Amino acid sequence: MLLDAASLYFRAFYGVPTSVTSPDGRPVNAVRGFLDMTARLVTAHRPERLVACWDDDWRPAFRVEALPSYKAHRVAPEGGEETPDELGPQVPVLVEVLAAAGIARVGAPGYEADDVIGTLATRAEGPVDVVTGDRDLFQLVDDERSVRVLYTARGITDLEYVDEATVTAKYGIPGRAYADFAVLRGDPSDGLPGVSGVGAKTAAALITEFGDLAGIRAAAARTVVPKAPLTAAVLKKLAAGAAYLDAAPVVVAVARDIDLPQLADELPRRPADPDALASLAAAHGLESSVARLGAALGWPA
């Protein structure tokens, strides 16, 4: 089980009131929510391995160089990612708690958690569940390799299980074609404009007809007599968006071969540092959440 950590702690922050505080009055709602979500996921799905995948770089330079608009609307005035004031200080606390608990956590310099997830999912020899609220990771679903997404759009207690059939049913495209679909349609939440005038319906029709973005562009280049879905209007839009189509795939495609260390990612049979975990739980008012996590992991009482 691969956790898209930032996706989950943002969800926890907005899902649990900031009135949930440590003994000294600091909000710990995101930390408690993350731990409780992890406990529920482990209880429900019993993974053999668990990794919290981290954004070491939430807006990598190689993606910004290809497409300067990438996540530009989320850059804070002082630089860095725009994050609620009450959330930022909680992230280091979560890092400490995960380390003391013995739950594997990994990021990679210059890459997002998506890329970490893509690499670990590609490496995996058995079934993989990716837990995220980010549709970009739908590109990883692979029925043959038993890679699916547990999508948190409705919350942890009402996950949507996304496989190739789900992608096809949602978007009318082949199950592994989500990345090219996203390039064409765009995604405002990531500053991805898409091809102007090409919406979801046209993007789906093009991908269904020609297989992928390379097939679409090759067909457009050799088309003499326009016909649906490559109508004259669509051909004109694709031509106008040529520079964007050159740049966007590297932005959307999740990396699957980045350099990551070998991980001790088995579920911890006991805390890695029981004393540190107890101290952190007491200092931040996390005793009940840590107890629930321990129960889910089968730690001795």
Image (cartoon, rainbow, N blue to C red):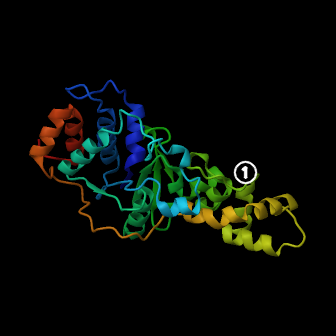
Whether residue 66 is visible to the viewer of this picture, yes or no, is yes
Up-down: is 166 above or below 73? Answer: below
Q: Give the position of the C terminus as an image quadrant.
A: top left
Q: Give the position of the N terminus as an image quadrant.
A: bottom left
Which image quarter: residue 249? bottom right
- For this view, does 127 lie left or right of residue 189? left
- For this view, does 65 lie left or right of residue 171? left
Amino acid beneath label 1: Gly
User: Going 53% across and 58% down the picture, which residue do you hit?
Assistant: 64
- Along the viewing direction, whichever of 160 and 189 lies nearer the viewer: 189
Whether residue 229 is visible to the viewer of this picture, yes or no, is no
- Residue 220 place in picture, x, y as percent: 79, 70
- Along the viewing direction, whichever of 91 and 34 lies nearer the viewer: 91
Mark 1, secondary structure of its residue: loop
Residue furthest to the left in view is: 275
Which image quarter: residue 257? bottom left
- For this view, does 22 lie left or right of residue 278? right
- Residue 299 place in picture, x, y as percent: 16, 47
- Residue 211 place in picture, x, y as percent: 68, 68
User: Going 46% across and 59% down the picture, which residue do you hit?
Assistant: 60
Which image quarter: residue 258? bottom left
- Along the viewing direction, whichever of 140 and 95 lies nearer the viewer: 95
Up-down: is 293 above or below 232? Answer: above
Residue furthest to the front in view is: 78
Q: Name the residue tied to disc 1.
A: 199
